[in-house]
Amino acid sequence: PPSSLLPPPSSLQFPLPLPGAHQLINSALAIATVQVLQQQGWKIPEAAIVSGMAKTQWPGRLQWITWQNQPVLIDGAHNPAAAIALRHYIDHSEKSAPSRFIGSWGMLTTKDHADVF
């Protein structure tokens, strides 16, 4: 059901520079937060929202780099939800990704590696 806190969706269009289907949910949450702030009197112009979304970066999260002419995917998947998102991205990547992946993980002892793998 629609929330009484949020206005109806606007025709606001913005780029989604962060890869991964899970980022659609994160982006929607960010926009909803801005809408709540606007309702509380914050003056946040649509141009600022579009600019902010376009400039959003998350180094180390589904980040492709090239090392010695080889594509390398860097991701800090350190909890089960992040590991699932990483696996989903690899399985459904539209990017011309390599046909095989070699994984290398490092984890603090405070993290439950069994839940991640």
Image (cartoon, rainbow, N blue to C red):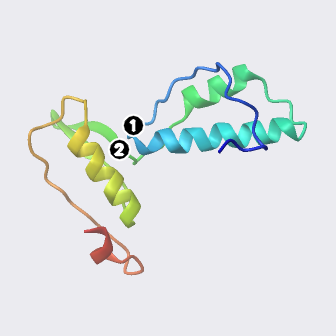
* Position of residue 11 measured from the top left corner of the image (x, y, whole percent): 64, 18
* Position of residue 66 measured from the top left corner of the image (x, y, whole percent): 24, 35
**Quadrant for the N terminus in the image:** top right
Q: Nearer the viewer, residue 72 or 5?
A: 5
Locate residue 110 relative to residue 64 in the image: left or right.
Answer: right
Query: Residue 51, relative to residue 72: is it above or below?
Result: above
Q: Please, what secondary structure does the residue beneath circle 1 have?
A: loop
Q: Residue furthest right?
A: 41
Task: Look at 40% across and 60% down and name the residue there.
Answer: 81
Locate residue 56 relative to residue 85 in the image: left or right.
Answer: right
Assess disc 2: are there few (<14), some (14-19) or many (≥20) residues with their C-alpha within 10 Å of its C-alpha.
many
* Position of residue 10 measured from the top left corner of the image (x, y, whole percent): 68, 23
What is the number of the mark on residue 62?
2
What is the number of the mark on residue 1?
none
Q: Please, what secondary structure does the residue beneath circle 2 have?
A: loop
Occupied quadrant, residue 104: bottom left
The type of residue carrying mark 2 is Leu
Occupied quadrant, residue 56: top right
Assess disc 1: are there few (<14), some (14-19) or many (≥20) residues with their C-alpha within 10 Å of its C-alpha.
some
Q: Disc 2 versus disc 1: distance between alpha carbons?
A: 7 Å
* Position of residue 95 measured from the top left corner of the image (x, y, whole percent): 24, 30
**Quadrant for the C terminus in the image:** bottom left
Verify CB contact (< 8 Å) between mark 2 and mark 1: yes
The type of residue carrying mark 1 is Pro
Tag 1 residue: 19
Q: Nearer the viewer, residue 62 or 27?
A: 27
